[in-house]
Amino acid sequence: MKLVVKLSVIVPFYNVQTYAPDTLRSLRANAREDFEFILVDDCSTDGTYDILRRARDDIPGAVVIRHEQNGGLATARNTGLDAATGEYLTFLDGDDWLAPGYYARLLAAAEDLGCDFVRADHVQVTGRARTVHRVPHGLRGVPFSPRDAILPADRTTSVDYPYAWAGIYHRRLVDRGLLHFTHGLRTAEDRPWIWRLHREAESFAAVGLLGVFYRRGVASSLTQIGDVRQLDFIRAFDQVIEETARDPEADKLLPKAVRTYAAVMAHHLDSVERFEPAVARKLRSMSAAALQRLPQDLLSDTLDSLGDQRAARLRRVRRRPVPAGTVPSVTTGAST
């Protein structure tokens, strides 16, 4: 009889030959006979794929899939989701690593709670520094409505903790079409994803397990590269706004979505000097168009509450002229 796979771990890799050995060793320290590891090489141009091929025989349950063209993190995760067979699924990035035995503990928590998905704390690693980051949800180990955890609009909530690898997800979410990512998004791919989970899944819980070590400051990471791919955050948040605007509770949820979009946009504009000049110009023009697409009453209320520096920056961009035809309206149940 074939063993039922309890957990599928989806790990995209792209040009991380320096870090992949640590990631793979930590997967080996989490292996179990009913776990599978879907290792997706997103058309790496360094030695990453060779490292994965060599590791395939060393890690029980490992499967290696190689993209012939680079598709980005969202697309690589989708490839893994399509190949996964587990009752539960989780993610890891190819430059991060795990504590030994972490996945067994996370799976046990998920089975005990019986939720659609469980969110977990993590350790952020920047050089030699270690910082614990916790799920911004006060109740621990208690099933809760994901929709009820979106608000309040003016506080950090669990939709602001979007990391796909900081949790575990039941297969029924795949069956309902809730776990795949927007194809081709190069950054902020987890923002529409986490919002959709919170709007449409039925139950979740937060647990205090620590076991994922999230590496920050990696030179090849998109968070460190000021090129045009970073601007996909606008497409990602446009999707959040459009989908939330169609929700039956749009009037209630949109203020949070607009505030989050504005805060992230202000963050990028505040660090505009890290972008190439042409990309910086494009960031300003795309931000101006995006601000004009938002429900204007909600945007005005948001700017009044964001704080002087961020609000002033966004108001300057909001006043920029935008070419005709570049600002399609957002259909919303809220007044505009």
Image: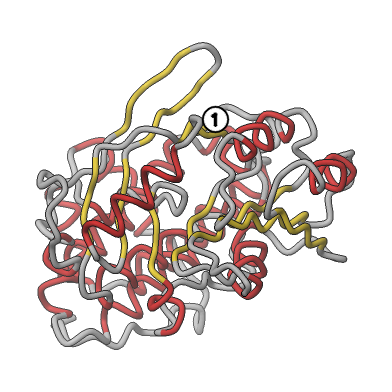
Viewer-nearest residue: 42 or 84: 84
Whether residue 287 can be seen here: yes
Relative to 152, say whether 200 is above or below.
below
> Quarter of the image holding residue 301?
bottom left
Relative to 55, say whether 200 is above or below.
below
Viewer-nearest residue: 211 or 124: 211
Viewer-nearest residue: 100 or 76: 100
Q: Residues within 10 Å of mark 1 (few under 14, many from 20)?
A: some
67 left or right, relative to 115: right
Query: Which image quarter is the N terminus in?
Result: bottom right
143 left or right, relative to 117: left
Viewer-nearest residue: 180 or 114: 114
84 left or right, relative to 166: right
Q: Residue at x 59, y 64 (%)?
A: 185
Q: Residue 176: image x %, image y %?
A: 40, 84
Name the residue tied to disc 1.
215
Q: Residue 95: image x %, image y %?
A: 64, 36
Whether residue 315 can be seen here: no
Q: Residue 248: image x %, image y %?
A: 16, 87
Q: Residue at x 55, y 58 (%)?
A: 34
Q: Residue 170: image x %, image y %?
A: 38, 68
15 left or right, relative to 149: right
Secondary-structure class at tag 1: strand
Task: Give the residue type that dot 1 points to.
Answer: Arg
> Quarter of the image holding residue 83?
bottom right
Q: Residue at x 20, y 68 (%)?
A: 203
Relative to 275, say whether 292 is above or below.
below
Query: Which image quarter is the C terminus in?
Result: bottom left
Q: Residue at x 32, y 38 (%)?
A: 121
Outermost residue toward the front? 1
